[in-house]
Every structure is written in structure tokens, then in C-alpha cells.
Amino acid sequence: MATDFKSLPVIDISPLLLKCDDPDMAEDTGVLEVVRQLDKACRDAGFFYVIGHGISESLISKVREITREFFKLPYEEKLKIKMTPAAGYRGYQRIGENVTQGKPDIHEAIDCYREFKQGKYGDTGKAMEGPNQWPEDPQEFKELMEEYIKLCTDLSRKILRGIALALGGSPYEFEGKIAGEPFWVFRLIGYPGAPFANGQPENDIGCGAHTDYGLLTLVNQDDDKTALQVRNSGGDWISAVPIPGSFVCNIGDMLKILSNGVYESTLHRVINNSPLYRVCVAFFYETNFDAVVEPLDICKEKYPAEEGSKVFKRAVYGEHLVSKVQTNFAM
């Protein structure tokens, strides 16, 4: 359960990355210190910053800047990659098309998902089939984003090895049937400056309060605008103040289930009170699309229900995702 935290912890994960492919990583004192910090962050807040992650600050910044260039294009140009159900819910969505808790969100975005062969996931996957829609302008957009996605995928896998150790399992607990072939979601998001809705700031919710669906999220946000807010157990909204070169990480619904509720997928929202346009690039590392997700045996043994941890029912990740996607867009 999340606590009454007042700020988000900052974790230097470089010792974990250094030993991440070593079968004896769990015996390394540097790794164990990172694991301890990850465990505390996942229990207390479900959110944390990571530094020492090995992805260059120049690439992190370039990804945001080329995204900003796209959103500056005329509306007609952006509509060339318009999201539709027929396109597998991949592509551009205008401001107000994304809906959270029945209310339109004040942001525009490009949504991308891991591509897969037609028919691979049967009827469940049919709604998500199709290639990602990448803009031709700006140039090199697709190439840059695909490079960035590969790096984020690798980084997420390594962070989850640390989280697996934190839960008392092997470093590879989340691989194989759970996330040996991880699905991913990639959202490039633009939030207009305030005030947007007829000068009424209470209507300027960039993204309403929600939890994320999957395992782990990496958030790359503008360095000069504070907009992401995380709710603590006391009901206060705590700002995730940008730290240049870092990622804001948070855990999602599937990891909450796997941990038997020991780790929290915490409510968060976005309110851009700056008069300037804000860009955020979010990478969501998920389980296998067809994974049946239920509490890990180690978590059921270590954190049984009678000690205050809820026993969660199983969920099929792909079904969970498709149900969310099909109700998230006003089309």
C-alpha cells in the first residue's frame, strides 16, 4: 500500500545495470542496495525517479524535441496518421479524444504498440492488429523512436530484474511465461499551455487520475514544467518535479497483481499549469500480450492474505488492455 509520502525517491540504478547479466547478481552488495531502494519505493509510493540508467540525456531530449516538432505541424498534417479502430488504435489523436473517467483529457498524442502478426492472439488481439503509424515529417522520426523503444525495453527488463529480487524471487521471475515476449505501449503526448478551456483552470486536466495497466512505465518529461502529480495515501497530490536526464518510473496494475498487492499501482494525473506547451514521452513495459497474470507463488507465500495483503484474482493482460483501449477514446 502507498504511504503518506511527500516526495518521490531518486534511485541510482547503475550498480544494478552493471551486474544485471551476471547469474550471481543477487550476491553483489551494490545490487542489493539498489534492490532495497526499489523495494521501499514500490511499497511506499509506487513511483520513483531513476538515474544512472545508461540512456544518454541528449537522446532523451532529442526524443522530446522531435515530438514537439510534430505537434507544431498544421492539424491537417497530423491527421495523415489519424488513429481509428480500423488502424488498431494506433496513430494520432486530437485534443479531447482520450477520455479518463468519462471526461476528455486536454492533450493530443501519438499512440503506438508492439506490432504482431495478424491472428497471433486470436479474437482478443484482433482489435490491436496493424502497423504503427509514424509521421513522414519530421524526418527520421520513426528511426529515432524505434531506437529509443529498444533502449527503453532493455532498461525496463533490467529494472524488473531488480524488482523481482526485491519481491524475494529470482532475477528472472518476470521473464518466460510472464514477460519473456513483453508487449509495450508507447505514447508521445502534448499538453497545451494553460489556460486552455475558456480560461477555466479546473477544466484543464491534461490527463485525469488513473493507474497504468502493465508492469513498469518510464516517463520522459520536459525539464522545465511541473505537471505530473501522484496521489499519496492521505489524498494529497505530490508533484513529480522534473529532474533532467532522469526517468520517472511507476508500477502498473499487472505488477500490483503479481506482487499480491504488496506493491501499489498508484493514482496519478497531469495538470499543466504552465502557459507553455508541455511534451511527455511515456514508455509502458507490459507482460506478454497473452499472459495470464496472477500473484507469484513467492508473494502468496511471503505475503499471505491474513497478513493484510489482498489475494488478487487472475487477469489476462491482453483482455485488460483491449477493454481499456476500447473505452478510452471518443471517436
Image: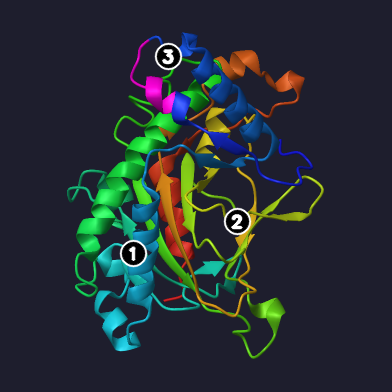
Q: Secondary structure at mark 3?
A: helix
Q: Secondary structure at mark 2?
A: strand
Name which residue type carries label 1.
Tyr
Which one is earlier in the sequence, the residue at label 2 or at label 1?
1
Q: According to the image, label 1 marks what residue?
A: 89
Q: Few, some or many C-alpha atoms within 10 Å of disc 2 (few <14, some 14-19, many ≥20)?
A: some
Mark whose residue sits in front, 2 or 1? 2
Q: Residue at x 48, y 8 (%)?
A: 27
Whole-angstrom CA distance, mark 2 to mark 3, is: 35 Å
Q: Does the magenta segment cover residue 17?
A: yes
Which picture quadrant has residue 38? top right
Q: Quadrant of the C terminus?
A: bottom left
Q: According to the image, label 3 marks what residue?
A: 25
Image coordinates for residue 83, horizontal then vertical, percent: 32, 71
Whole-angstrom CA distance, mark 2 to mark 1, is: 19 Å
Name which residue type carries label 2.
His
Q: Quadrant of the N terminus?
A: top right
Image coordinates for residue 106, horizontal then vertical, percent: 55, 75
